[in-house]
Amino acid sequence: MVSVHSFIAFAMQSTAALVEFDSSKLYDETDFAVSSMIIPTVGGRIYVSVPNSSADIARKIMVHDYAHDDMSLYDISTMTKGKKKGYLEVDVCRQLNSLFYAVYLQEAIRQVIFTNMNSGNATASIAVWVFSGLIITKGVDD
């Protein structure tokens, strides 16, 4: 029989910090303590917050979305749009020029892959907010 203490210890080790909303998900360093993580999405935005103390770790956690060059979480965290916090736009279908590739890669383009290249899958304080689907904006700078 499993003791309550053992069950709680197991549950704490197997939980992630993922917080889910209707059209977005919030991840933190606990979620990135793996070699790779796949997030299904058809488009949206990825916002990243990285304190200076976590910059070296964040530089080695890469984002791959099949339409852009790979970017690190640190690079995304330093992006700006005008005077506002920047983000990585994930709109893979619009980026593809060929109908053939859109059909052939249909399953592949419905995901974003995060790859942790740190030794031992090390993480540090990082917050990643992924908004999925159509983002309606009020203006060019939103």
Image (tube, grey):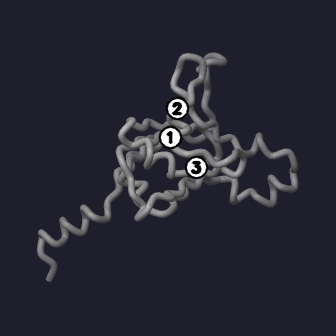
For the residue labelled by badge 3, is the local secondary structure a helix, a strand or a loop?
strand
Taking the image as shown, residue 77 lies to the left or right of residue 106, namely left
In the image, 86 versus 117, the foreground residue is 117
Task: Give the quarter of the figure containing the C terminus.
Answer: top right
Measuring 87% from the left and 49% from the top, which residue is drawn there? 98
Identify the amino acid type marked 3: Val
Earlier sequence position, callout 3 versus callout 2:
3
107 left or right of 114? right
Taking the image as shown, residue 24 lies to the left or right of residue 54, namely right
Q: Residues within 10 Å of mark 1 (few under 14, many from 20)?
A: many
Q: Which tag is nearer the camera, tag 3 or tag 1?
A: 1
Mark 2 element type: loop
Badge number at residue 125? none
Which residue does the numbered mark 1 point to in the structure image?
Answer: 74
- Tell me the amino acid under the disc marked 2: Thr
- The residue located at (60%, 49%) in the rendering is 41
Task: Relative to 38, say whether 74 is above or below.
Answer: above
Q: Amino acid at mark 1?
A: Tyr
Residue 81 versus residue 132: which sits nearer the camera?
A: 81
Estimate how packed mark 2 is, as few (under 14), some (14 to 19) or many (20 or more) residues with alpha carbons within 10 Å.
some
Q: Residue at x 64, y 42 (%)?
A: 43
**Which residue is pictured at 57% across the width and 33% down the height?**
87
**Residue furthest bottom in the image:** 1
Other-residue count near label 3 (Cα within 10 Å), few / some / many at <14 / 14–19 / ≥20:
many
Q: Position of residue 6 (x, y in %)?
A: 16, 72
Q: Which residue is mark 3?
A: 63
Q: Position of residue 97 (x, y in %)?
A: 85, 45
The N terminus, quarter of image: bottom left
Q: Which residue is mark 2?
A: 78
